[in-house]
């Protein structure tokens, strides 16, 4: 009789150990899966020819270009820049030509927005070199989708500003991000960029406009 109790006790211990084991495996598995999902590279959204009436031109740098390292990553931010190029004619198309000429070296970014259209230069899912913070974890290059706003003297900055807000709202929706995920180049490297928006104190106005277009 006591031997039988002893065996039953052993079985219970074995069963309990097995359950604890299964629990640990499932918990660890879930933690690992979540951390993988959090850093899973973002898939490119479906391509579109316009957003809110603004034409979008895909003019992607060839693979292997200096400015296109081809590093896949998860998009966590929209990073706002200005070209700081006040020359007449320095619009989105001109900046697409500039990037394609190779004269920009390793510098690159995803989109240039002007007062009438938008050019794309690097796929959303890939790193571009715009934030001045190399591949820092949590940084602008590794996690940011970058927009350069044109400031050419023969363009309307207010219209560019408005187009950028519309396009940012669209990107936030596409990638399930929030207004808190909109950053300035300045946040990552301390550079005074986007300069006009910063110096004229228009950052909050920009965020509010994006909020308005999201609603
Ligand atoms: Zn910048």
Image (tube, rainbow, N blue to C red):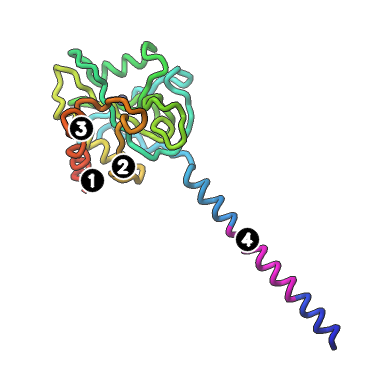
Q: Is ligand 1 less than 8 Å from the beta carbon at label 4?
A: no
Furthest toward the front, the residue is 190
User: On the rendered image, what quadrant is the N terminus found in?
Assistant: bottom right
| Residue position marked by numbered label 4 in the rendering | 24
Where does residue 206 sit, x and y in percent of width and height? 20, 37
Dot 1 surroundings within 10 Å: few (below 14), some, or many (20 or more)?
A: some
Of 124 and 147, the residue lying toward us: 147
Where does residue 15 sit, x and y in percent of width and height? 71, 72
| Residue position marked by numbered label 1 in the rendering | 214
| Residue position marked by numbered label 2 in the rendering | 172
Where does residue 199 sit, x and y in percent of width and height? 19, 28
Task: State how far apart marks 1 and 2 are (Cα).
Answer: 8 Å
What range of the chain is rendered magenta?
12-27
Q: Is 34 displayed left or right of 176 in the figure? A: right
Where does residue 74 sit, x and y in percent of width and height? 44, 39
Q: Say which residue appears at 39% left-offset and 25% top-offset.
A: 132
Q: Is ligand 1 less than 8 Å from the beta carbon at label 3?
A: no
Q: Say which residue appears at 56% left-offset and 50% top-offset.
A: 32
Q: Identify the element where label 4 is drawn.
A: helix
Q: Identify the element where label 2 is drawn.
A: helix
In the image, residue 18 lies in the stretch drawn in magenta:
yes
Q: Please report contact status of discs 1 and 2: CB closer than 8 Å, yes or no.
A: yes
């Amino acid at each position: 009789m006591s031997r039988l109790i002893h065996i039953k006790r052993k079985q219970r211990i074995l069963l309990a150990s097995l359950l604890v084991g299964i629990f640990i495996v499932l918990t660890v598995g879930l933690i690992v899966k979540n951390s993988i999902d959090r850093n899973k590279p973002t898939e490119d959204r479906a391509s579109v020819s316009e957003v809110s009436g603004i034409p979008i031109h895909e003019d992607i740098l060839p693979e292997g270009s200096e400015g296109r390292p081809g590093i896949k990553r998860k998009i966590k931010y929209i990073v706002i820049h200005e070209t700081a190029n006040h020359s007449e004619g320095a619009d989105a198309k001109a900046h697409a030509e500039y990037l394609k000429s190779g004269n920009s070296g390793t510098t690159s970014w995803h989109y240039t927005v002007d007062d009438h259209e938008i050019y794309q230069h690097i796929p959303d899912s890939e790193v571009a070199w715009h934030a001045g913070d190399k591949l820092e974890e949590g940084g602008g290059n590794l996690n940011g989708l970058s927009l350069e706003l044109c400031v050419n003297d023969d363009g309307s900055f207010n219209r560019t500003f408005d187009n950028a807000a519309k396009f940012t709202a669209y990107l936030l929706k596409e990638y399930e991000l929030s207004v808190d995920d909109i950053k300035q180049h300045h946040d990552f490297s301390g550079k005074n960029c986007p300069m006009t928006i910063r110096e004229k104190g228009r950052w909050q106005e920009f965020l509010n406009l994006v909020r308005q277009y999201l609603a």
